[in-house]
Amino acid sequence: MNSGKTLFAQLMACVPWTSFKRIVERHDGDRGVRTFPCTEHFRAMAFAQLTWRESLRDVEVCLAANPGKLYGMGFSQPVRRSTLADANERRDWRIWADLAELLIQRARKLYQDEDLGLDLVGTAYALDSTTIDLCISIFDWAPCNSVHAAVKVHTLLDLRGSIPTYIHISDGKMHDMRALDLLPIEAGAFYVMDRAYHDFERLYTIKQAGAFFVTRTKKNMSARRVRSMAADKENGVICDQHLALNGFYASQKYPELLRRVRFRDPETGKALVFLTNNMTLPPLTICALYKRRWSVELFFKWIKQHLRIKRFMGNSENAVKTQIWCAVATYVLIAIVKKELGIEASLYTLLQVFSVSVFEKTELRRAFSEAESQIETGWIVKPLPLHDI
């Protein structure tokens, strides 16, 4: 990294601009554009995410306050809020979705050797969704019910590195289990889900694809025990059983055996019942794998608190999806920089440094090492990190 560049310019240098150019050409993103190409559009949206700008005027004023540094940050001219608003409304959101996917592929390669602490051969994913509430009178294209609007972000999270590998943005009416119909199933992988995805027909599709699922059972599930395995009751495993489903329709949807593991959490004393199609893993590994599902909840909490996806710089579906995908791309880009530079600081610390130092001309690794040293010596009060990759 060149210390003569601003921190923002050094971060943007990590974007694969050549590949991004091909994405823009595929979607005709710069057709008829004279002054605000896609490269500058992404820089402006990433700047808003990094510095916590919540409106078009915020972005315009903050950049205009540093006119001498705009060229070095990749802007050919000052960013006008009307220009940014028009770009968010008219430029295809799939450009930013493809860019995020490109960065995700790069990040997954960097984090593929992360240790989960579990004896697993395949990749482990956590699937869940989060809802972003909207005003029905403004965002009438995203109805949730007669009086509310919302968008849902359905996310498949790679538990190695907490990298989102698949994201689908829908209106608030889409049920979580329908995301399973869109999910690319990887043979040999583990998919960890809560009870919202408890649908036997869809779970059997995962089984037929050669993958495994781990979920919670519903209270009204009707099944009969076929056999029981030895249970390690000293470590909290109450029972480990193979089941066959009762009922004509349920048995048609899932005609093979399932495995049920009943576990009592020693910390809370609560009994949890897990359902899986994996018959070989130790029951405690099944329980520990489901516990790691909490990573996706932390991911949603983290991006809602530290990225700008709760207030939008446009009211159309295209503008909302543009902002969400740019936020995801920014998140993954920071995760890439953290791994490639070997920075020990958490993502929270990285964002904190960027939020106040984007215009500083300091070498990237040095800026974060100085922040970490100040935290360790007590000059900065270290916050409790909600999510640490």
Image: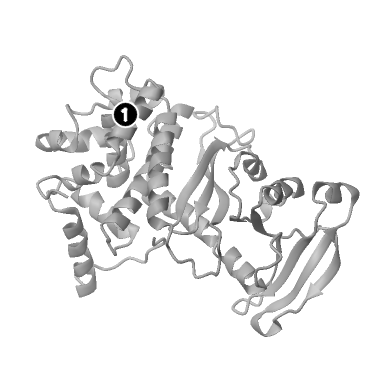
Q: Residue at x 62, y 42 (%)?
A: 179
Q: Amino acid at mark 1?
A: Lys
Q: Residue at x 67, y 59 (%)?
A: 215
Q: Residue furthest top?
A: 32
- The answer to whether one can see residue 118 in this image is yes
In the picture provided, is 167 more to the left or to the right than 91?
A: right
Q: Which residue is mark 1?
A: 21
Name above or below for residue 100 compared with residue 24.
below
Quarter placement of the C terminus:
bottom left
Q: Position of residue 264 (x, y in %)?
A: 68, 76
Q: Residues within 10 Å of mark 1 (few under 14, many from 20)?
A: some
Q: How is the image coloured?
A: one colour
Name above or below for residue 196 compared with residue 25.
below
Within the image, what quadrant is residue 70 found in?
A: top left
Within the image, what quadrant is residue 5 found in?
A: top left
- The answer to whether one can see residue 311 in this image is no
Relative depth, front residue between 210 and 259: 210
Name above or below for residue 238 compared with residue 61.
below
